[in-house]
Image (cartoon, helix red, strand yellow):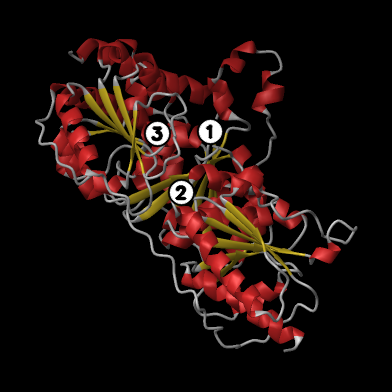
């Protein structure tokens, strides 16, 4: 068999094994050494290719697709520092539990560590950031090699999707020449599939859970980020059977698609409510059930830390503890949807009614602030209210996700909310939003600050290769707005230089460069008018100018108004 046929057989075995394992999308960055695999993917009708020339952005785009779909997505790059640029997204994928399949082309073994160009030490380069790593053999005419790579590809995808989901790395060396035969036949894999069962609660867990829930006098459900396709209808049936309030993080998805029966139990403004000292002292729960990771809200964390419930259950299919504040007393390892099938039969509690009344008060004050405000919060509220049914929102870290937590209130519209909360970074945000939109194929909106936008301007390159539907709202307060809420803001000296970091940059030129529709606004009314104009390009950028000090003042004014009304009207 000649070299081209050997190489073709090798890359087809990788491609077909990935497809059989459930990979349907690959984000490819151009490069020479990855040519054989890039051609193999392009020559298949069973996998979709997405192009992104910047490897860091490419990896985040793949991460967004995998996050939004819950399915494994592959990213492919050439050798050398191209692979190094994947590290930020690989890190996020690990801590956010996203099944990212990292494929790095490499020089053959004889060209490693001898001064060859674009050759670095790639095997194991992601260390503990990946769940599994393999350094493949070079293509050769040996049946055992093909069987090895076919099985290890499927093993890698199985490991990536097994709880806790996460990234895996396959390092794939190629010798020149790098061309393959197009239209070659499927290699006919001998290994068919990995089949897994579901982890279900055993009778003892069901008994213990039912008795513990029945004994609770002040039960509370906390819902952090939940996976795509989570069964919200079954969740609300479960919550109603307990009669407990549900503190719903925006990333849980539980604030949207709300039906009448769930409205009273859905507590969406707990972050503001828990800034009230009296409420925190008098509303300590005795039993907590948490689904997903710890929510965004710092006041919620302080509330739980200050009271430390006697029973704190974390429901997680993985044995890995997500308990950063050491609150958990019991780890229920099972598929969350299986636990939701348990029905407690409790009557709605007075404790739930008190939470509901506090949430009503907070909602009224927040609505008033949105109607009267001039800050970023008011503009974020306009965006949330204007988003159509059947659309998605991606929020950057720092202030955008916190404004989502504060101002995105429960709605009957179908709106998905996503963010990178694995390590809470502001890199790769634009690219992840493109990935979410590519997976969901719905109108998408990105809420982002000016510094995060500057971090990932290259993400816009995706719009030159793929059709998309993305509206980007850039909150330009000329610097790092979240630092104004932190203790270092009070130091005064050096604060603006080290933390405010004003750049004076505006994004009209960026919009022109990428052919994006552009609007500049300075008020909530201006934003409302801009959003209601017809969208004329695949990507629209709306730059909203604001003042960091005004934002700080308006946010604190709202929290104070809610706290004062709770003190005056809320009855315990």
Q: CA distance from mark 1 to mark 2?
A: 25 Å
Based on the displayed image, in which of its 4 quarters is residue 176 positioned?
bottom right
Above or below for 16 versus 224: below
Task: Mark 3 or mark 1: name the one nearer the start of the chain.
Answer: 1
Residue 40 visible within the image: no
Residue 542: horizontal and vertical position, in percent? 52, 47
Q: CA distance from mark 3 to mark 1?
A: 11 Å
Residue with the mark numbered 3: 405
Based on the displayed image, in which of its 4 quarters is residue 69 positioned?
bottom left
Spot the residue most to the front: 144
Q: Nearer the viewer, residue 110 or 268?
A: 110
In the shown orientation, is residue 413 left or right of residue 402? left
Mark 1 vs mark 2: give the one in front: 1
Residue with the mark numbered 1: 398
In the shown orientation, is residue 348 left or right of residue 391? left
Q: State the residue at coordinates (54%, 45%).
A: 94
Residue with the mark numbered 2: 530
Q: CA distance from mark 3 to mark 2?
A: 24 Å
The image quadrant where one finds the C terminus is top left
Above or below for 241 versus 568: below
Mark 3 vs mark 2: give the one in front: 3
Above or below for 294 versus 23: above
Residue 247 visible within the image: yes
Residue 88: horizontal and vertical position, in percent? 63, 46
Based on the displayed image, in which of its 4 quarters is residue 309 positioned?
top left
Q: Nearer the viewer, residue 149 or 224?
A: 149
Q: Does dot 3 land on a helix, a strand or a loop? A: helix
Q: State the residue at coordinates (50%, 63%).
A: 468
Q: Nearer the viewer, residue 123 or 441?
A: 123
Q: State the residue at coordinates (65%, 43%).
A: 454
């Amino acid at each position: 068999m000649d070299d081209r046929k050997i190489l073709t057989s090798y890359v087809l075995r990788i491609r077909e094994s990935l497809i059989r394992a459930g990979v349907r999308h690959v984000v490819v960055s151009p490069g020479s050494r990855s040519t054989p695999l890039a051609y193999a993917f392009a020559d298949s009708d069973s996998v979709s290719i997405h192009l992104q020339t910047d490897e860091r952005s490419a990896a985040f785009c793949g991460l967004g697709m995998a996050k939004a779909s819950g399915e494994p997505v592959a990213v492919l790059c050439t050798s050398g520092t191209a692979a190094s640029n994947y590290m930020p997204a690989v890190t996020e994928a690990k801590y956010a539990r996203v099944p990212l399949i990292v494929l790095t082309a490499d020089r053959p073994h004889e060209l490693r560590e001898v001064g060859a160009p674009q050759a670095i030490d790639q095997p194991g380069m992601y260390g503990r950031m990946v769940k599994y790593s393999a350094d493949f053999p070079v293509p050769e005419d040996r049946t055992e090699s093909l069987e090895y790579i076919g099985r290890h590809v499927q093993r890698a995808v199985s490991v990536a999707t097994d709880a806790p989901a996460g990234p895996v790395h396959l390092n794939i060396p190629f010798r020149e020449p790098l061309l393959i035969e197009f239209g070659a036949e499927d290699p006919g894999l001998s290994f068919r599939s990995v089949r897994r069962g579901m982890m279900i609660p055993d009778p003892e867990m069901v008994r213990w859970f039912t008795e513990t829930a029945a004994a609770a006098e002040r039960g509370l459900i906390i819902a952090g980020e939940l996976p795509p396709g989570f069964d919200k209808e079954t969740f609300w049936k479960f919550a109603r059977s307990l009669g407990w309030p549900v503190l719903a993080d925006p990333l849980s998805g539980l604030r949207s698609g709300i039906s009448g029966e769930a409205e009273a139990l859905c507590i969406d403004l707990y972050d503001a409510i828990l800034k009230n000292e009296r409420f925190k002292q008098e509303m300590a729960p005795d039993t907590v059930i948490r689904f997903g990771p710890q929510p965004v809200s710092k006041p919620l964390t302080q509330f739980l830390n200050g009271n430390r419930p006697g029973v704190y259950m974390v429901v997680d299919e993985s044995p890995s503890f997500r308990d950063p504040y050491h609150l958990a007393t019991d780890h229920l390892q099972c598929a969350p949807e299986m636990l939701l099938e348990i029905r407690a039969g409790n009557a709605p509690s007075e404790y739930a009614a008190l939470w509901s009344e506090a949430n009503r008060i907070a909602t009224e004050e927040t609505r008033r602030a949105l109607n009267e405000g001039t800050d970023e919060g008011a503009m974020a509220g306009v965006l949330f209210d204007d988003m159509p049914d059947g659309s998605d929102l991606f929020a950057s870290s720092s202030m955008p996700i916190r404004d989502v937590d504060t101002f995105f209130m429960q709605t009957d519209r179908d709106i998905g909310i996503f963010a990178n909360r694995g390590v809470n970074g502001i890199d790769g945000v634009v690219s992840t939003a493109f990935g979410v939109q590519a997976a969901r194929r719905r109108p998408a909106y990105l809420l982002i600050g000016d510094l995060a936008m500057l971090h990932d301007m290259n993400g816009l390159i995706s719009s030159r290769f793929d059709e998309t539907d993305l509206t980007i709202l850039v909150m330009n307060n000329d610097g790092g707005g979240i630092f104004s809420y932190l203790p270092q803001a009070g130091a005064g000296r050096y604060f603006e230089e080290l933390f405010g970091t004003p750049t004076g940059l505006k994004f009209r030129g960026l919009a022109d460069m990428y052919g994006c529709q552009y609007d500049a606004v300075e008020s909530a009314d201006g934003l409302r008018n801009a959003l209601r104009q017809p969208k004329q390009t695949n990507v629209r950028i709306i730059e909203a100018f604001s003042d960091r000090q005004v934002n700080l003042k308006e946010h604190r004014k709202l929290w104070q108004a809610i706290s004062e009304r709770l003190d005056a009207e809320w009855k315990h």
